[in-house]
Image (cartoon, rainbow, N blue to C red):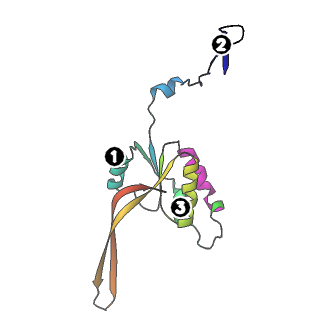
Amino acid sequence: MKVFGQKSKHRQEAIPEKPQTTLTRTQATLPIMKKLILLFNHICTQEQEADARTSLGIEQIVAPPQDILKIWSDLPPDLEKLSPQLQPVFAWLQTEMKPGDFVLVQGDFGAVYLVAQFVFANGCTPVYSTTERRAREQILEDGSVQLSHSFRHIRFRKYGA
């Protein structure tokens, strides 16, 4: 607190200091553009893109580069710890994320858990896509059953909500 002026010989008036909130010219004129950073093994559908723009206020969707996609889609099941394997993924996310961004993360349960914690720790929000699933069974001529599934995006849900 700064001491300002004197009312009498024994009493001083205190005025609290204001925090500095100086914006640079760029910060003052550019709007903050929210991104949805993709980290999952599927193609983002038009329905998901439209929902992200509407429900999350997303202006930009960022897909991972091929090397990150390769790591994410091919995590070895025999590893005891995933964190060392995910270091390039964390490094990529660190370069892409800004506080307020969203990360669509789905995949290996353990990897998703680690990435969601990382995303939260960096001031961003991890989300996943909820879907409506439909199954179709068809009995083939040889007596075997062919099962096919279709999925339709319903909404994004925040992890921890």
Provide the secondary structure element on which disc 2 rests: strand
Q: Is residue 140 above or below residue 107?
A: below
Give how far across and how far down residue 25 sits, in percent: 51, 23
Residue type, label 3: Val
What separation in Å lies between label 3 and label 1 (alpha carbons)? 25 Å
Give how far across and how far down residue 17 sits, in percent: 62, 21
Residue type, label 1: Thr
Residues marked 2 and 1 touching at CB (< 8 Å): no
Q: Which residues are magenta?
A: 84-97
Q: Tell which circle, 2 or 1, labels the residue nearer the N-terminal end.
A: 2
Residues marked 3 and 2 touching at CB (< 8 Å): no
What separation in Å lies between label 2 and label 1 (alpha carbons)? 51 Å
In the picture, which quadrant includes the C terminus?
A: bottom left
Q: Which mark is residue 87?
A: none
Residue in front for this viewpoint, 152 or 4: 4
The crowd level at tag 1 (other Cα within 10 Å; few <14, some 14-19, many 20+) is few
Relative horizontal placement of residue 79, taking residue 42 as reference (left or right): right
Residues marked 3 and 1 touching at CB (< 8 Å): no
- Circle 1 sits on which residue? 54
Provide the secondary structure element on which disc 3 rests: helix
Q: Which mark is residue 112?
A: 3
- Circle 2 sits on which residue? 4
Q: Residue at x 44, y 32 (%)?
A: 31
Residue type, label 2: Phe
Q: Tell which circle, 3 or 1, labels the residue nearer the N-terminal end.
A: 1
Q: How many numbered marks are there?
A: 3
Q: Tell which circle, 3 or 2, labels the residue nearer the N-terminal end.
A: 2
**Residue lying furthest bottom in this view?**
142
Residue in front for this viewpoint, 94 or 65: 94
